[in-house]
Image (cartoon, helix red, strand yellow):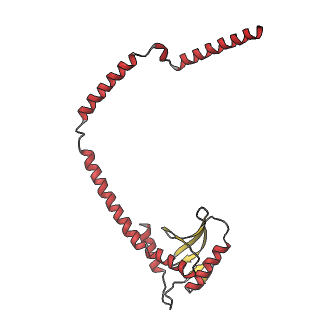
Amino acid sequence: LNIQNDMKLVKDNTRMDNEEKFSTMKLLDKYYNTKESAGKQILEICSNKQEPNSEEIGEYRGLKIFLEIDSFENKFILNLVGKYKCGVELGNDIHGNITRVDNAIAGFEKELEDTKMRLEETKVQLENAKETAQIPFDKEEELKQKTKELDEINIELNLDKTENEILDDGEIEEKSEKMQKEENEYNKDDDFR
């Protein structure tokens, strides 16, 4: 799974051996070693961003960082991208944004477990569906009988229709042309009156 690759990438690129327990963040080709300086720079980048499209702004713990504006909600989204993509809604708090990013990365483990659980549930549902598909339809004879009765009723109903009610496309076109000619002749007679 892609998220497993990203978990390994994060683990291999996380260096929290400083006082703040903060791994260096690269933003616009500069490195930030504290949560405060990285948080300030993220807010600065947001304040200068005018286009809503996603653009790469840096790297953190082995993942590329992309920033975009959600114009509909009028908010900034920071996307952490490896093989997997994880979006983080940004706020106005310097430390809060870094905490959100770290929490999103910490959530990879839970996302992986949830995905594995959904996969197992889907496999069970598939097996159940295969078993159900093998069970014969016990109302098949009754369905055939009801279908036959319905066909007979439809035939009887169709017998009541007159020939004028059942026209194919050619007959409709002929009648339309005939009516048009009659109308034109009537209009000519009006011109002479």
Numbered marks: total: 0
| Location of residue 174 in the rendering, given as x and y in whole percent from the top left corner | 58, 15
| Location of residue 50 in the rendering, given as x and y in whole percent from the top left corner | 68, 68
The answer to whether one can see residue 9 in this image is no
| Location of residue 160 in the rendering, given as x and y in whole percent from the top left corner | 40, 16
Frontmost residue, 163 versus 121: 163
| Location of residue 18 in the rendering, given as x and y in whole percent from the top left corner | 50, 90
Left or right of 126 in this view: 30: right
Left or right of 29 in this view: 125: left
What residue do we see at 56% from left, 86% from top? Answer: 34
Give the vertical position of 121 relative to 77 (above or below): above
Frontmost residue, 141 versus 10: 141
The answer to whether one can see residue 121 in this image is yes
Which quarter of the rendered picture does the C terminus lie within? top right
What residue do we see at 27% from left, 30% from top? Answer: 144
What residue do we see at 60% from left, 77% from top? Answer: 42
What residue do we see at 32% from left, 26% from top? Answer: 150
Left or right of 172 in this view: 181: right
Frontmost residue, 109 versus 13: 109
Which quarter of the rendered picture does the N terminus lie within? bottom left
The residue furthest right is 192
Frontmost residue, 47 versus 30: 47
Left or right of 186 in this view: 9: left
The residue furthest bottom is 19
